[in-house]
Image (tube, helix red, strand yellow):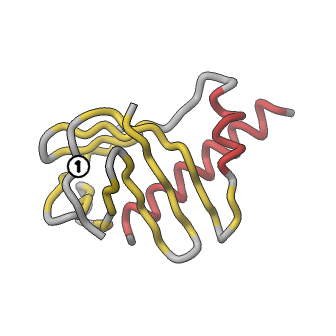
Amino acid sequence: MKKTLSAVALALVAVLLMGCLVACGGGKISDGTYKLVQMTADGQDISDQLSAMEQYGMSLDLVVSGDKATLMDEEMTIKDGKFTASDGTSAAFTVNGNKITVEEGNNKMVFEKK
């Protein structure tokens, strides 16, 4: 049951994350690996699902290097405070210290530098 819940949570996280990255203010990101530490979907905090996923060795990391970022094998460019995917979709982000926040409507994801 927990494996199924974790798989469903991971799929939901992936879909929401890509949705937010497609639709979401700006800032300079320093190179490194950022771990997804907080997530809100449709206004509800589902961060506890991230902990459940970690118990099974699953996590979502955003890897930033220069003007490129990679998430789940999707490479994006970083320019003018936006992530831009290979299909041309883009999303704005905000940077506050060692955290990157991507928001769209009632969905929010916070990545923290490892």
Q: Looking at numbered disc 1 in the image, what kind of residue is underneath it?
A: Ile
**Residue assigned mark 1:** 29
The residue shown at (71%, 44%) is: 48
* Above or below for 66 versus 80: above
| In the displayed structure image, the side of residue 20 where residue 90 appears, left or right | left
Q: Is residue 20 above or below residue 11?
A: below
Number of other residues with Cα within 10 Å of mark 1, as a class: few under 14, some 14 to 19, many 20 or more: many
Instruction: Assign the C terminus to one quadrant of the image.
Output: top left
Along the horizontal axis of the image, is 20 left or right of 81? right
Left or right position of 50 against 73: right
Question: Left of 68 or right of it: where is 19?
Answer: right
Image location of residue 82, percent across then percent down: 24, 63
Residue that protrudes farthest toward the right in the picture: 1
* Place of residue 21 in the rendered image (x, y in percent of width and height, measured from the top left): 38, 61
Helix, strand, or loop for circle 1? loop
Percent coordinates x, y for residue 33 in the rendering? 33, 33
Residue pushed farthest bottom? 105
Q: Residue at the spot x=30%, y=70% of the render?
A: 25
Residue drawn at x 68%, y 58% as measured from the top left: 45
Residue at the spot x=24%, y=60% of the render? Answer: 84
Q: Residue lying furthest front in this view? A: 97
Quadrant showing the N terminus:
top right
